[in-house]
Amino acid sequence: MAEMISAQGADQPYRPNEAAGTAGGSASLAWTVRSEAPDGSEITAVRRVINAAFPTANEADLVEALRQDRDAWLPGLSVVATAPDGEVVGHALLTRCHVDGSPALALAPVAVLPAWQRHGVGTAMIHALLDAAQAADEQLVLVLGHPAYYPRFGFVPASGYGIKPPFEVPDEAMLALALDPGRPVPAGSIRYAPAFGD
């Protein structure tokens, strides 16, 4: 079994609180967040989730390309959420990027099957990834995402750290999270893995 990285501890399912919601009002909705199986047995299930969550195959193709990049793919930083029956219902990924030569992590994509969206699955996966990154002594996580969603995890505009993306995006959508406020945060331009196409 892949290593559990949920904050709830080994073999403990994540159960959403009332604020996160539950399917059909049922309190029985539960899932487990863990590292994706390292043997590759969940690649097809992950692709199915990503394809269901996004309108095109671009994000699924991105994940496949990142898997092949030994400099970008980091063991243990690809997580899945599974339903009680073992079905993979969510996937989230951190990969290596750099800010002017200093290592950082890129959060993308975060995907949840439509039937499981808005029930806290994405939130649980992001918390698990951030916990794993902090445990691995990483310092900086970057995400190009919804400015109303990611601040709940502590993300702030990357421009506040002097970090800029390699392409034009709204300032409020390029976000950064310093995992250890006591350590310096590098400034400069983001260099993503080649699969991102920058």
Image (cartoon, rainbow, N blue to C red):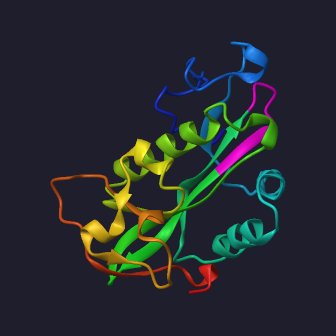
Which region of the structure is painted magenta? 83-91
Magenta-colored stretch includes residue 90: yes
Q: On the picture, is 115 further left or further right than 105?
A: right
Q: Position of residue 169 (x, y in %)?
A: 50, 76
Q: Quadrant of residue 1?
A: top right
| Residue found at the far left of this picture | 182
Residue at horizontal 55%, vertical 36%? Answer: 124
Q: For the image shown, how many numbered marks are present on the structure?
A: 0
- Image quadrant holding the C terminus, namely bottom right
Q: Is residue 26 left or right of residue 66?
A: right
Question: Residue at position x 49%, y 27% from top?
Answer: 9
| Residue 6 image position (x, y, % from top left) | 51, 34
Query: In the image shown, does 70 or 198 lie closer to the viewer?
Result: 198
Image-based side of 25 in relation to 173, left or right: right
Residue 69 seen in render: yes
Does 157 lie within the magenta span? Answer: no
- Report which quarter residue 138 is drawn in: bottom left
The residue closer to the viewer here, 66 or 146, is: 146
Q: Where's residue 134, x and y in %? A: 35, 50
Residue 3 visible in image: no
Q: Nearer the viewer, residue 33 or 21?
A: 21
- Give the x, y percent position of residue 98: 39, 77
* Residue found 64% across the figure and 73% down from its top: 66
Against 178, residue 116 (above or below) is above
